[in-house]
Amino acid sequence: MENFKETKIPDIKGGIADSHFHNLNYTQQGTEPRNLIEAMNLQDMRYAVLAPIPTSLLLRCGNCSHDHDHGHHTKSEVKTEAIKKFWSNYNPAEGLPAAAQEHIESIIPNYYISELKVRNAFSATAEEYKKLIKKDGPLYYDTNVDAHTAASYKNLPVEVQDRFDPMITGLALGDMRASEKLIMKLRDNPGVFTGIGEITVFKEWVQHKVQAGLQADMSEQQRALIKLMKTCGTIGMPVILHCDVNDYRPDDKGVNQASEANNKDRPVYLDAILEFLRHQDCQGTTIIWAHACGLGKYSRALPSHLDNIKSLLEDTRLNHVKIDLSWDTVAEQLLFTDQQLKDKAKEPDNEKLSALADLINKHPTRFLFGSDSLSPNSVDIWQKTSTIYSPLFRKLSDIARQNFRIGNYIENIRNARFKVRLWEILCMPYAAIAITRRTDNELPRAAKIAISIAIKEAIKNGKEQINHILSSPKISGPDNSEKDPENFSKLRSTLLQYAKAYSETVKYSADDLEKWATYIFKDKSKTAPWTDNNDFVNLIDEVEKEWGAEGKALEALKAEILQDKEAYPERYKDLSSSQNSALIAVDRAIRDAIVHRMMQVELQLQINMGLTPSTERIPDFELKNNELRSIWMDIAQRGKEYNSQNHSPFAAYLNQVQAEITKASAKES
Ligand SMILES: [Zn+2]
Ligand SMILES: [Zn+2]
């Protein structure tokens, strides 16, 4: 578990952290985290994100059915044949086929572009490009990648876990429920994830290979993405965003020709991306724009690129935006001229190197190192990007170098772990109810609204607690809780109790929880912001105000809660009242659901016995159908257990029903 006191590592001299790393590739092949540690140690790497590629390559058998000489086949046709052969010989459950293995290993694609001609930027003509790119299969969102990340992370020893920041990547960005899916992933794996990404909006050919509706863009189809950004900001999760700043131009033969031919020096997507980043729902989220603000194999740096980055960094509405300089092809573009790259020059261009170093020195908190290594199988390959950046590292000021290599990773990624854990403890139980609760039930609308408000309140209070914790001064001395105001120990025990319940799903030590609770209530100069007394009765009043007659229908419910409160005060005393409100609201919903289910069964019984269906209870009846009888008994029993306090009219009703069934059964036999 994160030690919250350690928000900065005291000594981060030396060492590097990889803010952009893919342990698995486009076919989910690669290295398990536990096997990465040695490679990390060899390159003095303290931390790395774990970001599997979520857009899996769909390997299709293909259409190559005609029988001709392999010598006349294109590479892709040979691949299609290889895939066919692979599948006809190979059953993963039985192990690799020895005969096919040799032939296959170099040929089965694991990248979204298998044609080398296309993969090497601008080495194909427009016509060739269009033809060749279609040879590869489409991509599909493999949302299961996150479950795998979580499973492999949870199996690591704690000290090894500390080296990684598992990232959620398997989200369909065009789905308006992507935020809900994110919360479900957190709910299913508490204590695991730090952030999301790399997520991809525009990337050369990738966005065209994903089913259109699943993909986000920077125009109409960005609403789900904006919602997702806001959700991440609320939870405290940083986002690593891939979005090419320029589109692919197959006619381009190089950077300079590209800008001349198009006679414009402004990348086509730049303004739309800036507008997106400036959106008010994005401003509370740490967004790391990958690859030096959207460079890539095809999205080449135009001469104006560093100036554009400079304006971004100086725009106060974009303070939440950080930049990673990941990807070897990007590092090369930033440091070498086209001619130098052609000549395979060893030393970077002095002018380019100085310009980039100056920019980072001037904004030392904004840049992060990342390798963008894709499922590397050697330390050398993993280190390719950092090797290219060696001259840059030397050119940076001490503070800029330190921050670029590791400090900004700790600040923006590693330190986010603590925020996300707090959100998981204080908000997630309610957020999880909110996103999975069916609303198409028979509850009165006002009751639904009251429940929604109660849940919202509970989440809001959780957020207030988190903000309170995050703004509190750090613990510096021994615990002096004896001097605390009267309610201190009460609040503290409340939180402990709450956190302990949570710890049944996430294994935190009692010691940790104790420290947390102490920490939270340490700052006695402030009134705890979540102590205002909004209980469910107040919420009902609110609904009444808003919904008039419909809200009035809740009068009975209100009376029952007040009665319940009086009879069972201990239910209400421990948790803060708003949290209790949400629990009661949900409790009510469950109770109502049982009643509704019973009504359905009762209706079915009436039909079954040839009676005219009525929603009125039947005073006396015989049960002919054993199955229905057992369902009824079961529901009644469960309802009774649930309602074990035996205090409400509902419990009396259940007793009555059970007695009737017993009587009827006795009469039958
Ligand atoms: Zn990328
Ligand atoms: Zn990447």
Image (cartoon, helix red, strand yellow):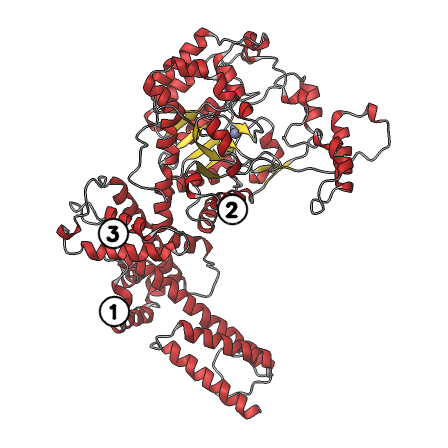
Query: Which label is found at residue 363?
Result: none
Which quadrant of the rendered structure holds the N terminus? top left
Secondary structure beneath dot 2 equals helix
* Residue in view at x 62 percent, y 33 percent: 209
Distance CA(mark 1)–CA(mark 2): 42 Å
Q: Looking at numbered disc 1 in the image, what kind of residue is underneath it?
A: Pro
Question: What whole-number distance in Å separates the C-alpha atoms at marks 1 and 3?
Answer: 20 Å
Residues at marks 1 and 3 touching, judged by CB atoms closer than 8 Å: no
Q: Nearer the viewer, residue 180 or 160?
A: 160
Q: Residue at x 56, y 7 (%)?
A: 339
Q: Position of residue 42 (x, y in %)?
A: 48, 26
**Label 3 sits on residue:** 530
Q: Is residue 324 left or right of residue 203?
A: left
Q: What residue sits right under mark 2 in the picture? A: 151
Q: Nearer the viewer, mark 3 or mark 2?
A: 2
Indicate if the residue with disc 1 has its beta carbon within 8 Å of ligand 2.
Answer: no
**How dense is the environment of label 1, judged by Cα within 10 Å: few (below 14), some, or many (20 and up)?**
few
Helix, strand or loop under label 1: loop
Q: Quadrant of residue 17?
A: top left
Q: Position of residue 605 (x, y in %)?
A: 56, 80
**Label 3 SS:** loop
Q: Quadrant of the C terminus?
A: bottom right
The residue located at (51%, 27%) in the rendering is 372
Q: Which residue is mark 1?
A: 569
Q: Is residue 526 above or below residue 392?
A: below
Within 10 Å of disc 2 (Cα), the crowding (few <14, some 14-19, many 20+) is few
Amino acid on which the number 3 mark rests in the picture: Trp
